[in-house]
Amino acid sequence: MDRKEETIAVKRALSQAGYKAQVTHGTGTAWGWLTIKLLRKWVPNDSATLEKVEKIAMAVTGRNGDYDGRISVTYSF
């Protein structure tokens, strides 16, 4: 799947799981990274939430390997 399809699929899966997030890809040297920013007021602020979101993204994209499949999950302020 290409970057656009991957972004749409991950955003849809997170929405279905009840998470509001901004999903993008990196630029420059981080071109291959999938970046997920959770909207803080909609989700609990804990590491378990970050892990759940990461697992959803990995399942949808099929990514694995170094740095958790090059997926970055953070909170948006």
Image (cartoon, helix red, strand yellow):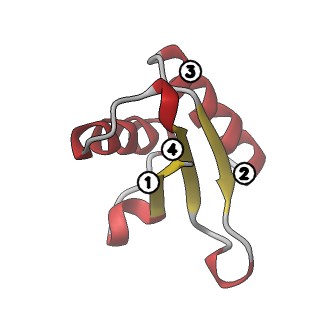
Locate residue 67: give its quadrant: bottom left
Q: Which residue is mark 2?
A: 2
**What's the amino acid at mark 2?**
Asp
Q: CA distance from mark 2 to mark 4?
A: 10 Å
Answer with mark 2 or mark 1, whichever residue precedes in sequence: 2
Distance of label 3 from label 1 (alpha carbons): 19 Å
Q: CA distance from mark 1 to mark 4?
A: 5 Å
Q: How far across and how far down the image is residue 55, in percent?
A: 33, 40
- Compare residues 74 and 27 and report the one nearer the observer: 74
C-beta proximity under 8 Å, tags 2 and 4: no
Secondary structure of the residue carrying tag 1 is loop
Q: First in sequence, mark 3 or 4: give its number.
A: 3
Residue at position x 57%, y 57% in the image: 34
Q: Nearer the viewer, mark 3 or mark 4?
A: 3
Residue with the mark numbered 3 = 15
Q: Point out which mark residue 63 bears.
A: 1
Label 1 Cα neighbours within 10 Å, binned few <14 / some 14-19 / many ≥20: some
Q: Are marks 1 and 4 in contact (CB under 8 Å)?
A: yes
* Residue of label 4: 61
The vertical placement of 75 against 17, above or below, is below
Indicate the amino acid at tag 4: Thr
